[in-house]
Every structure is written in C-alpha cells, then in structure tokens.
Image (spheres, rainbow, N blue to C red):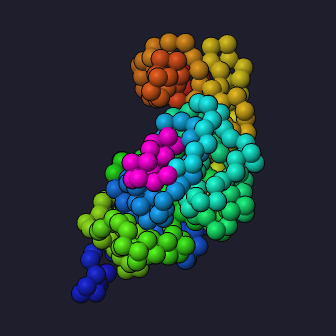
Amino acid sequence: MVRHAANQSPHCNIYQHAAEQLRTLLNIPPNRAILFTGSATEVWERLLQNCAESESTHFVNGSFSKRFCEFATELGKKTQVFNAPFGEGFDVGQCAVAETSEVICLTHNETSSGVSMPVADIHSFKKNYPSKIVAVDMVSSAPYPDLDWNLVDTAFFSVQKGFGLPAGLGVWVANEACLRKAEALKAKGLYIGTHHSLPSLWKSSLNHETPATPNVLGIYLLGKVAEDMNRIGVAAIRRETEAKAAVLYNFLETSTLYKPTVQNPAHRSQTVVVADVADAPAKIALLKEHGLVIGSGYGTHKETQVRIANFPATTMAQIEQLLHLL
C-alpha cells in the first residue's frame, strides 16, 4: 500500500510518475521543471507573461505560429516578426534577431501547413543568441523531435496529438533561466499571472503538485502512454515515424491526384503530412466510409488540402490502407 504524507495530496505519485516517464522519453535533464497546464495554448500566455518584459521574436508561417505572436501583441509586448508564406519554412541564417528581444518563439511543427523547422535550425538560435530565451512549440510533433535541452530553454506540447489522449492537458518544460526571468519581472512589480505564474507552478512541481486541482486523469494517462513509449524506445518511435512519412511523401510525389503542399523536403513535417488535392471534402467523406479519418486543410485551405496525422499510434498497416484508398 502506498502511504502519503499528511501534507501530500494523492495525485502526487501520479504527477511524479508522468514527469519521470516524460523525462526518460524526451531526455529532459533533472534541472528542467516539467509543469502541467490546461493546454499548450495556455502556455503561450504564461510563457510570454513570465519571460518577456517588453519584446519577443516570432517566426510565423501558419495559423498557430501566427496566434502565438498575436498573444504577445494582446499582452502588450512589442514583437519582431519573421514571416514565411504558407507551406514554406525559413532561411534562419538570414533572420537577425533584434538585440532588444528577450524571447525567441519558434514553432517546430506548424500544424496548419505541415511545415517543420529543422532541429538544427532551432539549436542555432541558442548558439547565436545565448542570452535570449529560446522557446519551442512542439504541440503536433512531440515526442518526435530530438531536442538538445542545452540549446533550448523551454518547450511545450499538448497531449491530444502525438500522445493520442483526450485534449485538456498541456506540458511545459522550463529551465532555471526562465524561472529567474519570471522572478525578476515580479520583483519589478510587473504582472506575471497569479495562481499559475511560472514561479507558482515551479514551486508546486518540486513536491509533484500543481497550484490548483489538475487534470488528474489526463496526467495519469499521459504517464501510462509515456511508459509504454519508453518500453518501445523513443529511437524506434522516431525511426517508424520517418519510415511512415517517407511512404506518404513518396505517394504524394508520384500521384497524379495529390501533391505535397510543402515543396522543400527539408521543411516537410514528419508528423503532419499536408497534401493539395481537388475536392478535398469528397476525398475525406470517401475515406470515412471505409473507417479512416483524415483532416481537412486548415482555414481557407479546407476545400483544397487534406492533412494526414502520422503520430505514433498510427501503424504502417494503416498508412498502407490509407494510400490504397487514396
């Protein structure tokens, strides 16, 4: 029987198990806090409140990276914005981050367009701007990207994509540089949030707790899924993800009906494959008749694109069945 200390809530062991499994899965160092929020969208706000006093830099090439930037504007921050057309990535070597910017906000995998920023490009920012906080949105790619946590200050994701769980839980990984910045802003009398500020979340995490009643079931299930992924091994999961993506992109390259939306192979997502196609709704409806569900294009691309999730829960057999029907 598990005994809990008098001042320790029963969900502590659940939190601890989930955090330990994620730490193993993503190779997160011990000095990084693993925090739980209501969603990754919430992390956009918490991160900008706690780590940017006045200015942040954003790389925008789709709807979600754009929304991340809009959060900064709505919070009264000045923003430096690098824009790329929908379906294209960045030549990061040509993007000079402003000296006054405090946080570099990167989206590893733009869910709306199927564009991925190479991990080497992500790492280059910390090498070139060591005093700035490098933040990575990995919502629709975790656990695929192999981040070097020495070159990333903070990253976050939600559980309904690559972990195959119901929505309603965000995971925020942050280092001590983020915490120090939040504490410095608070000491200046600046608003960094209340119950769910970074210092509050961090303090509670030391006891495997959250400041407010958390999504206990979500945390429990995440711990179990991460444990199962660790049995398989993250390296095997990454290899399988790449193998399935290669099959998908090869089909799109050779098809007369479909073509890959992202033309540059170096910027193609391994986890969200987007294709241009005539009459996308009809194709989606046909697949549903056979028990397969794929996504429509995002926003204005609903009629002309489809989005195929290539997450760990999707098997190669399912990909092959999908391509046969397509």
Q: In which quarter of the image is residue 246?
A: top right
Compared with 62, 102 (above or below) is: below
Residue plotted at (67% across, 67% down): 130
Q: In which quarter of the image is the C terminus?
A: top right
Closer to the camera in the image, 84 or 282: 84
Closer to the camera in the image, 325 or 280: 280
Q: In which quarter of the image is the N terminus?
A: bottom left
Q: In which quarter of the image is residue 311?
A: top right
Q: What stretch is highlighted in magenta?
A: 65-78
Compared with 279, 71 (above or below) is: below
Task: Give how far across and how far down residue 29 sits, in percent.
Answer: 59, 73
Q: Is residue 315 on the magenta stretch? A: no
Q: Main secondary structure of the magenta part?
A: helix
Residue farthest toward the bottom in the current orientation of the protein: 6
Residue plotted at (41% across, 61% down): 49
Q: Is residue 156 visible?
A: yes
Compared with 3, 244 (above or below) is: above
Residue plotted at (48% across, 59% down): 54
